[in-house]
Image (tube, rainbow, N blue to C red):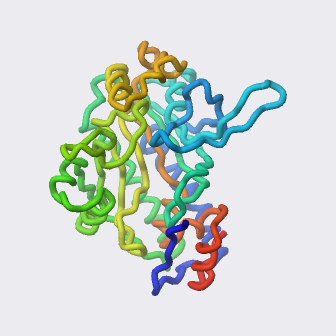
């Protein structure tokens, strides 16, 4: 059942066609700004992978990939959930040196996604990944990268507001860094999502760090697959959304697992069976470069900068009847 809702006083700032024009300009500006700031080169990426390679992102371990049989090969394909693992292999195959990386358009179908204002079964991201050295696997380097991404978002917002003066979002360029354990200590009686909302109401731009491992309460802040992010050095970039009056995640990212972190997290997550998969064998053997990477939501960023209340206003997807009815009653146009 959809949890979509439209704020009572909400009205779209831009018309339907202005929205389409702004989406196109936003994507072009942000891509160029991010690539320049992060030293990234654009590459082509797959829509689907062989499910037996271990390259697909397992997300929280319960989501079902969209799979299909291929007549000519007699094998199966699986639509990607994300490109977290594929990018690391691509960096090796392209021969990228330390300090350089790639970015690409990632399109996915997540058929088990709960639908609400921020979530759709269709996912579009800028996926990026960069080669780093052992000395760069630090919290300081993670924080510096977060600040660079936030800076690219702010510059993109400035450019869009210059072209569409009716837009009003003004992000705070200062990033408040906090770990999930610090959040639990600050708000012990709140759920993880409520903690994020409380923190973002006070700090308009934030980076929530160290997601995936168990906290002192015995529960993780949120799920993370054990085989791409290092749970001690990963992060979510969030802004306060003035339309929805809540925390709003734009990016999930992190320094990726090295062999030691992969070994530890596979055991902790009870996923030792993955060690036999080609990707995991290569990583555990030290055959893949050390990297940092993440995904930045394209529709999410469009929602935030264009002041939209529902993700369906900036992407074309399939919605349940309750969502369509709620949007129609509020005068909201879903693409």
Q: Is residue 64 above or below residue 205?
A: above
Q: In the visual, does 224 lie left or right of 232?
A: right
Residue closer to the observer: 69 or 120: 69
Image: 153 above or below 77: below
Quarter of the image that includes the N terminus: bottom right
Name the residue at 53% across, 32% down.
87
Residue placed most toward the observer, 90 or 200: 200
Q: Please, is residue 73 above or below residue 230 in the view?
A: above
Residue positioned 52% across, 83% down in the render: 11
Image coordinates for residue 158, horizontal then vertical, percent? 43, 65
Seen from this angle, which residue lies furthest top?
285
Left or right: residue 297 compared with residue 48: left
Does residue 324 appear in this view? yes
Q: Position of residue 321 (x, y in %)?
A: 65, 72
Q: Position of residue 84 (x, y in %)?
A: 49, 36
Q: Residue at x 62, y 62 (%)?
A: 315
Q: Position of residue 322 (x, y in %)?
A: 60, 74
The residue closer to the viewer here, 251 or 169, is 251
Q: What number of labels is visible?
A: 0
Q: Is residue 241 left or right of residue 79?
A: left
Residue at (56, 84) in percent of width and height: 330
Q: Can residue 160 be seen?
A: no
Instruction: Tell which residue pokes out farthest to the left in this image.
Output: 185
From the image, which quarter does the C terminus lie in?
bottom right
């Amino acid at each position: 059942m959809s949890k979509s809702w439209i704020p009572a006083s909400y009205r779209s700032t831009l018309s339907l066609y202005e929205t389409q024009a702004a989406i196109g300009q936003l994507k072009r500006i942000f891509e160029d700004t991010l690539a320049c700031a992060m030293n990234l080169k654009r590459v082509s990426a797959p829509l689907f992978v062989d499910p037996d390679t271990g390259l697909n992102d397992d997300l929280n371990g319960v989501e079902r990939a969209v799979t299909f049989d291929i007549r000519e090969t007699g094998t199966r394909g699986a639509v990607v959930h994300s490109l977290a693992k594929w990018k690391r292999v691509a960096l090796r195959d392209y021969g990228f040196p330390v300090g350089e990386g790639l970015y690409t358009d990632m399109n996915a179908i997540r058929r088990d996604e709960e639908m609400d204002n921020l979530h759709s079964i269709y996912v579009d991201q800028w996926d990026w990944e960069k080669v780093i050295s052992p000395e760069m696997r630090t919290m300081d380097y993670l924080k510096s990268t977060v600040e660079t991404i936030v800076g690219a978002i702010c510059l993109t917002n400035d450019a869009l507001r210059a072209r569409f003066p009716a837009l009003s979002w003004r992000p705070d360029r200062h990033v408040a860094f906090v770990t999930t354990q610090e959040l639990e200590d600050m708000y012990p009686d709140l759920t993880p999502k409520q903690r994020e909302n409380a923190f973002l109401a006070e700090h308009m731009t934030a980076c929530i760090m160290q997601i995936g491992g168990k906290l002192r309460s015995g529960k993780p802040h949120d799920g993370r697959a054990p085989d791409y992010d290092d749970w001690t050095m990963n992060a979510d970039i969030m802004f306060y959304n003035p339309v929805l009056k809540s925390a709003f995640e734009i990016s999930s990212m992190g320094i990726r697992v090295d062999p030691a972190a992969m070994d530890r997290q596979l055991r902790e997550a009870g996923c030792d069976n993955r060690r036999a998969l080609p990707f995991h064998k290569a990583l555990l053997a030290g055959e893949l470069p050390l990297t940092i990477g993440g995904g930045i939501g394209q529709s999410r960023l469009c929602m935030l900068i264009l002041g939209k209340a529902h993700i369906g206003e900036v992407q074309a997807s399939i919605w349940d009847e309750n969502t369509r009815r709620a949007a129609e009653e509020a005068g909201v146009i879903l693409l």
